[in-house]
Image (cartoon, rainbow, N blue to C red):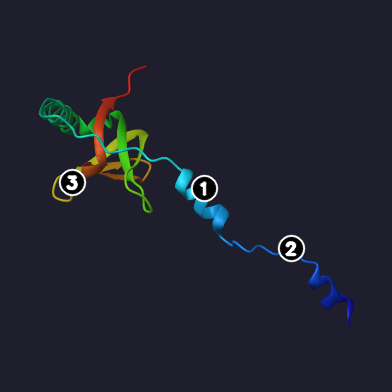
Amino acid sequence: MPLTERAAQFAPFAALTGFEDDVEETERITDARIEITEDALREMDERMSSLYERISQRPEIILTVFEKDEKKTGGRYTEVSGRLKRIDEIQRVLYLTDGRSVPLKNVVDIREYEE
């Protein structure tokens, strides 16, 4: 028997291929999406109106965004910051000067950057 074939006899064997990945996926924790109250929605609308009026000034904003998980229920919250370039009211998307876009349906909070 050639040496290369003999070495294959002693190679490690994983009987449960993919098991570790499944365990890691099960252990990964996701956040539940919080329901936004009417008061919070009203406050966000006021902030959006203020930002819309000053869009030419490219205000710096911080968005709290819910990103839905592709594999599990729930998702995670992240903060996205940058200068606001444009608001597409029809598509309901915020565009930042660095080229990123954020759908308004995923935004749970909008703040202006304060130094």
Which residue is identified by label 3? Answer: 92
Residue in front for this viewpoint, 107 or 22: 22
Secondary structure category for the residue under label 1 = helix
Q: CA distance from mark 3 to mark 1?
A: 36 Å
**Pointer 3 local density, CA inside 10 Å: few below 14, some 14–19, many at least 20:** few
* Residue at 59% from the left image edge and 61% from the top image edge: 16
Q: Amino acid type of disc 1?
A: Glu
Q: Position of residue 23 (x, y in %)?
A: 51, 50
Whether label 3 touches label 1, CB < 8 Å: no
Which residue is identified by label 2? Answer: 12
* Residue at 38% from the left image edge and 53% from the top image edge: 71
N-term-proximal mark, 3 vs 2: 2
N-term-proximal mark, 3 vs 1: 1
Which residue is identified by label 1? Answer: 24
Residue in front for this viewpoint, 54 or 61: 61
Secondary structure category for the residue under label 3 = loop
Pick the quarter of the image with the N terminus.
bottom right
